[in-house]
């Protein structure tokens, strides 16, 4: 009922008696399990929080495919520092545009906001369980994106800047990058979803062709793509001793494509 009709913060629109009737179970059994209506709704929130539909951060394989397709289109540019930068910027531009639109079209944002808000109206234990359950899904998403960045950046001769690497040179730095980049997109999706069509149109609207990162390529941009690309460039730097190897590059691209295929 919730997935088809939507979830409201107050849950006053959900009738426990109607649920009992549709479930075709004894009323006495239901009230033994949940003596109070609030007990049932608390458990309902926890169960909803476990569902994929409630997560604001679910892999959009098409976004990752856009990134890899853009990389393949620009293989001829990778032998030079300038070419690798141009390719990275274009991957960020196309991928973030796709990701913003894909997330904005998903109703999970509404469920996520309602669950977060409704959970806070219950006692601390329920609130904590709902928040921790939602956090697990977010953590899985961040780990997945960190793996993707960790796979694609070496192809582009790029690495995390030293201040952002965390406790080690490896995955920790990419986790931080994924967290910051995800927040950059999520914040604009939430703003567009909450503020209505006017703001949504402004954020999605393309600019005139521009070259904001001095790559020599002029392309149309929008708010999310500018924010995302700026974040990636600010947190990464070129590998000074990078040596381009086309064969190794193609091998790594195939590995990434296999990874996307498993999502």
Image (cartoon, helix red, strand yellow):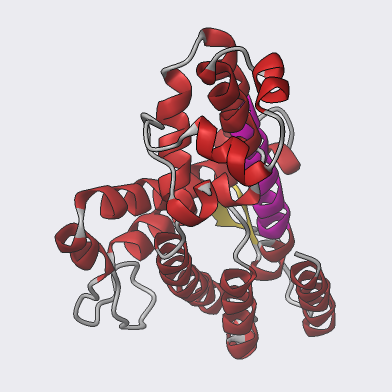
Q: Which residue is at a point 63% across and 59% down the rendered structure image?
A: 59
Instruction: Using the image as rendered, state which of residue 164 and residue 37 is in the foreground.
Output: 37
Q: Which residue is at a point 50% across and 56% down the rendered structure image?
A: 4
Q: Is 148 one of the magenta-colored residues?
A: yes
The residue most toward the left is 198
- The percent coordinates of residue 113 (x first, y second) are 41, 39
Q: Is 71 one of the magenta-colored residues?
A: no
Look at the image and tell me in which quarter the C terminus lies: bottom right
Instruction: Using the image as rendered, state which of residue 10 and residue 22 is in the foreground.
Output: 22
Secondary structure mostly seen in the magenta stretch? helix
Q: Quadrant of residue 217?
A: bottom left
Q: Is residue 193 above or below residue 251?
A: above
Q: Which residue is at a point 40% across and 68% down the rendered structure image?
A: 101
Q: Is residue 121 above or below residue 144?
A: above
- The percent coordinates of residue 199 (x first, y second) are 18, 58
Tell me if 115 is positioned left or right of 151 in this view.
Answer: left
Query: Which stretch appears magenta?
Result: 132-150
- The percent coordinates of residue 207 (x first, y second) are 21, 75
Q: Which residue is at a point 48% across and 24% down the rendered structure image?
A: 119
Instruction: Using the image as rendered, state which of residue 180 and residue 204 is in the foreground.
Output: 204
- The percent coordinates of residue 248 (x first, y second) are 84, 77
Instruction: Using the image as rendered, state which of residue 93 and residue 28 is in the foreground.
Output: 28
Q: Quadrant of residue 68?
A: bottom right
């Amino acid at each position: 009922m919730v997935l088809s009709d939507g979830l409201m913060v107050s849950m006053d629109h959900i009738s426990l008696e109607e649920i009992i009737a549709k479930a075709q179970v004894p009323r006495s059994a239901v009230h033994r399990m949940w003596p109070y209506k609030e007990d049932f709704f608390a458990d309902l929130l926890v169960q909803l929080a476990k569902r994929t539909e409630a997560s604001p951060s679910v892999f959009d394989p098409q976004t990752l495919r856009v990134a890899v397709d853009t990389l393949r289109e620009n293989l001829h540019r990778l032998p030079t520092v300038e070419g690798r930068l141009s390719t990275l910027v274009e991957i960020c531009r196309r991928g973030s545009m796709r990701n913003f639109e894909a997330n904005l079209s998903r109703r999970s944002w509404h469920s996520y906001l309602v669950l977060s808000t409704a959970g806070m109206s219950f006692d601390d234990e329920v609130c904590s369980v709902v928040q921790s359950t939602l956090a697990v899904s977010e953590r899985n998403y961040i780990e997945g994106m960190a793996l993707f960045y960790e796979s694609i950046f070496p192809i582009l001769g790029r690495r995390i800047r030293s201040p952002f690497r965390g406790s080690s040179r490896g995955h920790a730095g990419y986790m931080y990058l994924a967290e910051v980049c995800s927040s950059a997109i999520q914040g604009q999706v939430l703003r567009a979803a909450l503020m209505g069509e006017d703001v949504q149109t402004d954020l999605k609207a393309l600019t005139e062709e521009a070259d904001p990162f001095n790559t020599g390529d002029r392309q149309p941009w929008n708010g999310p793509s500018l924010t995302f690309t700026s974040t990636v460039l600010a947190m990464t730097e070129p590998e000074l001793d990078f040596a381009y190897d086309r064969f190794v590059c193609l091998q790594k691209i195939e590995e990434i494509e296999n990874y996307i295929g498993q999502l």
